[in-house]
């Protein structure tokens, strides 16, 4: 199992798949399955029967997780970058490989 370097709240860019080129914030990281929920990415429509939560039923939009390998972290300037680690003042900090600044 690879170490996941993307965390909740990060701005990411989808680099592969149906939603390629879409940007969004990470809502949740699913560590066991190497996937993440990204805001506005991989939305699907589900037809639901009436239930206690939705008494009328109907069509709802739902976000599905996307694989971590299809995501790339973005810098503050909006460029995609890889992630590295550095020790600063005794703390391990994530850094951008492209701009060498901490994330």
Image (cartoon, grey):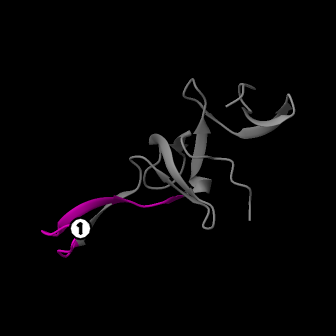
Task: Please give the count of numbered marks on the rendered protein.
Answer: 1
Q: Identify the magenta region.
A: 48-66
In what quadrant of the picture does the C terminus appear?
top right
For residue 53, above or below residue 84: below
Does residue 52 appear to the left or right of 86 in the view shown?
left
For residue 43, above or below residue 76: below
Q: Residue at x 42, y 61 (%)?
A: 64
Q: Residue at x 86, y 28 (%)?
A: 89
Q: Residue 59: x and y, percent?
A: 20, 64
In what quadrant of the picture does the N terminus appear?
bottom right
Q: Residue 19: x and y, percent?
A: 43, 50
Label 1: how many Cα within 10 Å (few below 14, some 14–19, many 20+): few
Q: Does dot 1 land on a helix, a strand or a loop?
A: loop
Q: Was residue 36 drawn as part of the magenta stretch in this picture?
A: no
Quadrant of residue 53 within the rendered picture? bottom left
Q: Which residue is mark 1?
A: 53
Q: Of residues 11 and 93, which is closer to you in this image?
A: 93
Does residue 97 appear to the left or right of 35 in the view shown?
right
Quadrant of residue 62 within the rendered picture? bottom left
Q: Of residues 92 and 81, which is closer to you in this image?
A: 92
Quadrant of residue 35 within the rendered picture? bottom right
Q: Residue 24: x and y, percent?
A: 46, 41
């Amino acid at each position: 199992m690879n170490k996941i370097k993307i965390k909740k709240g990060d701005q990411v860019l989808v680099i592969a798949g149906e939603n390629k080129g879409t940007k969004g914030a990470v809502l949740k990281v699913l560590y066991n399955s190497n996937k993440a929920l990204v805001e506005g990415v991989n939305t699907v429509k589900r037809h639901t029967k009436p239930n206690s939560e939705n008494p009328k039923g109907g069509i709802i939009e739902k976000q599905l997780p996307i694989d971590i390998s299809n995501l790339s972290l973005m810098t503050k300037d909006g460029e995609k970058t890889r992630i590295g680690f550095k020790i600063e003042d005794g703390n391990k900090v994530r850094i951008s490989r492209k701009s060498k600044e901490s994330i």
